[in-house]
Amino acid sequence: MQGRSPLYFKGLVIIGVPLLFEIVIFSSLLFLQANYIQTIKLVTQTKQAVSYAGELGRLAFTYLTNKMSVSFQIEERNWTNFSERKNDIKTISGWLNDYTLADKAQRRKILPIIRAIDDLVQEADTLNSEGGGDHSAVPNAMLGGKIKVIKSLSRQVLDITDGLHEFRKTQLKIAENALAHSSTVNQLITTTIAIAFIGNLLIAGLLLRFFMSSIYQKLQKLIDNMNRFARGQALSEPIHGNDEIAGLDLLFHKMYCDLNAAQKTKQNYIELLRSRFEQPIAASKEFLSSVKVDTTLAPEATKGAERSERNLERLLKLIDELLLLEQKAHAEKNIDLKLSEVELSDLLKRSMEAVSDFAEKGSVKLELNAQHKLLEADGDRLIQVVVNLLSNAIKFSPKQSTVRIETQENHDGVEIKIIDQGRGVPLDKQKKIFERFGQSESSDASEKGGTGLGLPICKDIIEAHGGSLGVDSIEGTGSTFWVKLPKNKVKV
């Protein structure tokens, strides 16, 4: 069985500590509540015992006096009253007997009193049995005996009264102590609730600090490293620790280092290709330069040599832009612009001249409808963009079709449109074609000779001017690629 992870134990701390604290508090409150209820019950019973003790003494005294009155024919017999009082005495005696079952000390006090009351009732009953049931005068011979019994009963009543009084005092003391205890328990309950409230706040604060230091801050640092990676920035130092987050960050740093190494290898390879291309291209340019100065050639051949020379220069620029794209993706390096005043219509004418041979070969007609505007821009870079857009339009246009260049000025600036009658760009590919190596069809690289780099380079160039590049297209009816340059770039 694999060992538990550090995050597992941190989760146990976050969940277990407050749960354990709540169990302790809840158990304490249950115990105090049960103790409080027991105390209140004891207070109620002791008060009832005090009341019953007083009632028992009163009943015993009343029973005796009534028996004496009947015995000396002071009042008539009322057997119903005697029976009811005797039953009351038995009921109260039985309750006091049951009440003291759990308290041996109190039981030792109350049992002699209960027995004395039973004896008192029995002896009081003998007064009537000796006196008969009529109302005739009591004989002198029996009078002395009854007086002796009455004296004995009176002493018993006094003893019972004293015993009950002592019992009541004891019960009142017990009730007083129980009330004091209930007050203490009530205070403990209040204190426990306060401790629970403050403890929950403290535990929440400590757990929050624990979570922030051990989990949240590490996650934030990991997310920050991911954002840095997405922006091409250097990562922060690795997260310290032995938990899963630190391990994930360590793997992320390793991946970052591996990608940097691969990126550097790729960049070195591209630079090597440029150096290999540069020598034959330079030789070709030198040959074309000699052709241009040859006066024996026709003017068309001289113009063709000039166009070929410019195209070779743009080929080198394309390789340079590929290097720049890699640098930009890796270190967010912006394209350097050489701004100057350029005339828009002249710039578009030069762009059309650069692709005229390509258009003629594809039997595609080029049309220009441009306004004369002065722009503050990098002319060579804008020509590079327009040439790329025109080349794509010609490449994907059918024979005998027309590619038009139009310009339009509005309140936002100036807009250049390249309109073709080709196959169009599917809606789901209209964003992808501006990404590196993105093409509208997977077969374009082999059939049309595309690299998937031209449009991303164009997009970077236009965005470096503060403008935007996009396409409006309906599949099967052609495309309109537009370049929008901001108003601050328009001079006239």
Image (cartoon, helix red, strand yellow):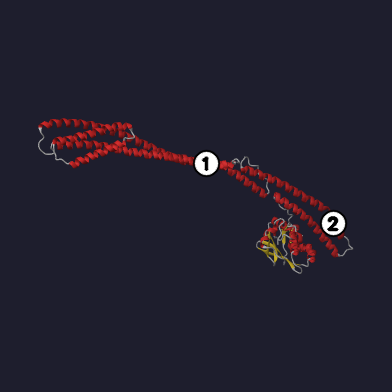
Nearer the camera: disc 2 or disc 1: 1
Res. 448 visible in picture = no
State which quadrant residue 208 falls in: top right
Q: Residue furthest right?
A: 296
| Quarter containing the C terminus | bottom right
Q: Nearer the viewer, residue 279 or 370?
A: 279
Q: Is residue 406 above or below residue 191?
A: below
Residue drawn where x is 53% and y is 40% of the image: 206
Residue 450 pos. (x, y %): 75, 59
Secondary structure at badge 1 equals helix
Left/right of residue 470 with respect to residue 42 in the rendered view: right
Check residue 284 in the rendering and tell me which mark sits there, or answer none.
Answer: 2
Q: Amino acid at mark 1?
A: Gly
Judging by the rendered image, the residue that carries numbered circle 1 is 16
Q: Nearer the viewer, residue 348 or 133?
A: 133
Q: Are marks 2 and 1 in contact (CB under 8 Å)?
A: no
Residue 122 pos. (x, y %): 21, 35
State which quadrant residue 115 falls in: top left
Residue 102 pos. (x, y %): 34, 35
Q: CA distance from mark 2 to mark 1?
A: 78 Å
Residue 136 pos. (x, y %): 10, 37
Q: Nearer the viewer, residue 415 or 50?
A: 50
Q: Residue furthest bottom?
A: 400
Q: Amino acid at mark 2?
A: Ser
